[in-house]
Amino acid sequence: MPVTDVTKDLESRTITVTSEFAAPVDRVWQIWEDPRQLERWWGPPTHPATFTDHDLTPGARVKYYMTGPDGEVYPGYWDITEVAKPSRLAYDDGFADADGEPQESAPVGSSTVDLLATDSGTQMVMTATYPTAEDLQKVLDMGMEEGITQAVNQVDALLAA
């Protein structure tokens, strides 16, 4: 299993997911950069993702949706804030309406992805910070920890393909 640790900290309003991959940093970066590869792992197996807009440029908006087993669609977006290829990506991650526009009442997490070279490949550290502890708790109650863990645990198969 790629996920080695999940740390939730309501005081700092963060959830951090750490994972390890037996692949170089450049290869792990590709799973973020290529929307077709991203679709193969972003979202748990029961809720696969489809990316409709994908541009990893600061100021751009990435749009996607996940489809549940019952066919229900769950739109989301990332507002890209920082790109330091191939080691860092930062974005604001939120829930969207049917048109892909932000849901004003839903929590938005400021997320970072850091890819660090290790002796055995790459360590990926994903951290999401929410404006309030209540916002973090809301996404945790929605199953974020389980969902992101299941999603990231699909990456090994993608990297091996």
Image (cartoon, rainbow, N blue to C red):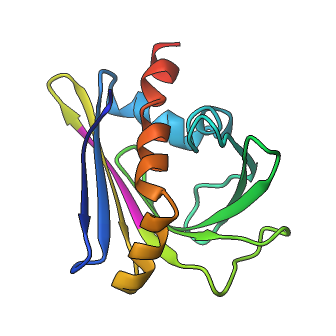
Question: In which quadrant of the rendered view does residue 84 lie?
Answer: bottom left
Q: Residue furthest toward the left?
A: 119
Q: Can you see residue 13? A: yes
Question: In which quadrant of the rendered view does residue 20 lie?
Answer: top left
Q: Taking 102 as reference, is 52 above or below it?
A: above
Q: Can you see residue 85? A: no
Q: Taking 149 as reference, is 89 above or below it?
A: below
Residue in the foreground of this view, choosing between 67 and 78: 67
How many numbered discs sit on the rendered protein?
A: 0
Q: Which residues are magenta?
A: 111-116
Q: Looking at the image, which residue is at 22% across and 35% down?
A: 117
x and y percent of residue 133 in the render? 34, 82
Residue in the foreground of this view, choosing between 31 and 139: 139
Q: Taking 30 as reference, is 137 above or below it?
A: below
Q: Is residue 122 magenta?
A: no
Q: Residue furthest toward the top?
A: 161
Q: Looking at the image, which residue is at 42% across and 65% down?
A: 140
- Left or right: 155, with 99 as reference point: left
Residue in the foreground of this view, choosing between 156 and 143: 143
- Left or right: 35, with 160 as reference point: right
x and y percent of residue 24 in the render? 32, 26
- Left or right: 24, with 30 as reference point: left
What quarter of the picture does the N terminus occupy?
top left
